[in-house]
Image (spheres, rainbow, N blue to C red):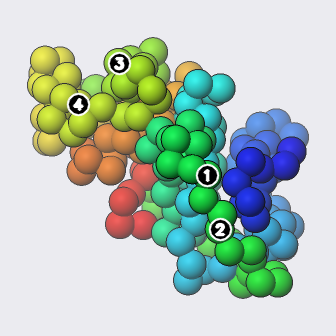
Amino acid sequence: GASPVTHAQPIRWRDLTAADGSLSTDYAALSLRLQSLGLSAGQPVVVLADPFQGLGEDARVVWALRTLGHGQTVMVDGGLPALRAAGLPTIQQPVGHGDFVVERHDDWSLHAAEAAHDLVLLKASSAPDLLTDDGHRKPSPMIEAWLERQGIDRDSYLATDGTEGPAALWLAAVLIDLGYPVRNLDGSEAYLLSAAN
């Protein structure tokens, strides 16, 4: 559908998947689709969703774009409600097609069979514990204290379960942005999200 942010390009997770719901492997088609939205390799991508209408849909797109090789992909804390509160900015309209070409990063894979015995699996149901009432992620010290109460520190081997849906990817993205080494465990479709990538 149309985006409420002027000139923003609408995209859904389904736009990047194969018929079975996994990330598409038709890289030529994905490259053309993303280029048609104006996506370029050297320009940051900001993904926007509404945390009250499907928490983690934005993180799912961020995960997909990072996996497909776009390392400058982030999501908006607080999503659409935060932008509405700030007065809904108008962004510059993309100038023609972008130049982004998919280059998948499978070196981030974590298959269930490779998971170590000391892996701490974080449940997506805990994601709402990290949100404020207005849909922003809680301040870093509060999230770190929440993790400490569960016996988790920055040396813990962490994963979220991608089969739990977009909230698991949101949880992983938030913790990665805070510097925790988190992987998404989801059979053959598991990729380390990296703030550096």
N-terminal of the pair, mark 2 or mark 3, is 2
| Residue plotted at (41% across, 34% down) | 136
Residue 50 in sight: yes
Q: Which mark is residue 109?
A: none
Amino acid type at mark 3: Asp
C-alpha span from label 4 to label 2? 31 Å
Residue at the disc numbered 2: 91
User: In the figure, 133 relative to 188: above or below?
Assistant: above
Snapshot quadrant of residue 183: top left
Helix, strand or loop at label 2? It is: loop
User: In the figure, 109 relative to 153: above or below?
Assistant: below
N-terminal of the pair, mark 4 or mark 2, is 2
Point out residue 45 in the picture as x, y percentages from the top left corner.
58, 66
**Which label sits in the foreground, 2 or 3?**
2
Give yes or no for contact between labels 4 and 2 (Cβ–Cβ under 8 Å). no
Residue at the disc numbered 4: 143
C-alpha span from label 2 to label 1? 9 Å
Amino acid type at mark 2: Ile
Left or right position of 72 against 155? right
Residue at the disc numbered 3: 129
Helix, strand or loop at label 3? It is: helix
Helix, strand or loop at label 1? It is: loop
C-alpha span from label 3 to label 4? 9 Å
Identify which residue, 66 or 109, lies in the foreground.
66
| Residue plotted at (37% across, 41% down) | 174
Point out residue 101 in the picture as x, y percentages from the top left corner.
70, 78
Amino acid type at mark 1: Leu
Residue at the disc numbered 1: 88
